Amino acid sequence: MTVDLGIQGPVFYKWLPLGPENGIRLCRGDLELVLWLDVKSVQWASEVAEEDIPKHINLTAHRIYGDITAAMDDVELLSYMPVRDFSRQPTEEEAPLAERYETHGREVFSLLADGVNRLLMFIRVEKGQYWLNPLEIDLDRMAFLSAEFEAKAQVDGSPWFRWQPTHPAVFTIDAPFFREAPSRYLTSRDWPEAQAFVSGEGRPNLPRQLLAAAEAFAAAGSERVALTEAVTALEVAVSRFMSSPKPDYLVSEPLRSRLGLESLANAHERRGLTYSVSFVLPILFDEGTLSSQTLATCREALERRQNVVHRGVRRVDPAQLRRFLGGIRKMCEVLQEATASQQRNNG
């Protein structure tokens, strides 16, 4: 396999560990991984000749190769791999073989991820190359990973074949999806607002600005920073809503006294963001406006952010982060619409 490390890979000085013989080995059970580089590993915009390597003081490795050797005695599976037909789903007879192929694939990809990430961790920690991020491998997307890593295999020196332990996923998109523009796409209705913003001196919407930054950090692999930015966006949106609620959102007596709510703003200031999201907002918004799922996702995001900031948790799962960002964006939009409605009514 060929693993793309991106434009900001590990940097070497006047030297490269060329070839498998100078690689790094990691064994697990019946699998052996060898990680190695060649001259092409450092070629991004221009070629580097092997004899010129000692002349370069900063050689960035943009790709690394992973060779995995598996000792297998499953003759049926070894015969099935090279001839698997990816133009169709496995037949009923092939299903047990396809299942064993997938199990084998998970073991191979797990070993590859562990080896690459241990190497990147060593370089990041011991050499201070802080820009290195771990390789994220989603084992539910092995067909895509096989294509991305240009995976190929051979059995006992036979011809190379396409190695892909799962069938490509098939997505069905219904036509109604296109009846309305996705919320992130520009439409003709957005253009006057864009013209007014560029021509004027207004400031961008702060929660949306923070959310965009959070998504950019997430895309760059900075999950912890992304989560912190997203929770900050939520805090701004909640604070603005609590400071200018519509009369319809005020809790009436005697419930207000029972909850100790002199005003929404005071409740938020005294009790904080978690209290507002967990107790106040579920009372003020019905399920159709702010779903229980969105509320639960935001509560979970707040708890995760507390673990990151105050308990030293180092890692935020990327898939979990995507769910947090989606829930927080939804809640921010609901709160901002409620706040804008109040401002229009008072305007």
Image: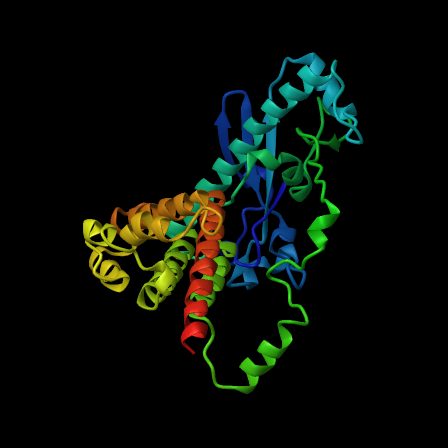
**Residue 25 coordinates in the image, percent (x, y):** 51, 33
Residue 236 position by quadrant? bottom left
Instruction: Using the image, determine if residue 229 lies above or below residue 295.
Output: below
The picture places residue 159, in percent across and down from the top left corner, at 78, 28
Quadrant placement of the C terminus: bottom left
* Residue 169 appears in the picture as rendered: yes
Give 227 or 248, whichever is nearer the viewer. 248
Q: Nearer the viewer, residue 145 or 310?
A: 310
Q: Residue furthest front?
A: 253
User: Percent x, y for residue 43?
Assistant: 64, 57
Image height check: is 19 above or below 189? Answer: above
Tag count in the figure?
0
Between 41 and 93, which is closer to the camera in this rendering? 93
Asked if one can make out residue 315 in the rendered structure from this viewpoint, the answer is no
Left or right, 62 with respect to 171, comes to: left
Q: Position of residue 233 (x, y in %)?
A: 40, 62
Residue in the image at 42% along x and 69% along y = 206
Q: Quadrant of the N terminus?
A: top right
Residue at left 63%, top 13%?
A: 73
Depth check, front residue: 135 or 268: 268
Q: How was this image coloured?
A: rainbow
Q: Residue at x 67, y 15 (%)?
A: 96
Is 260 on the left or on the right of 79, as rendered? left
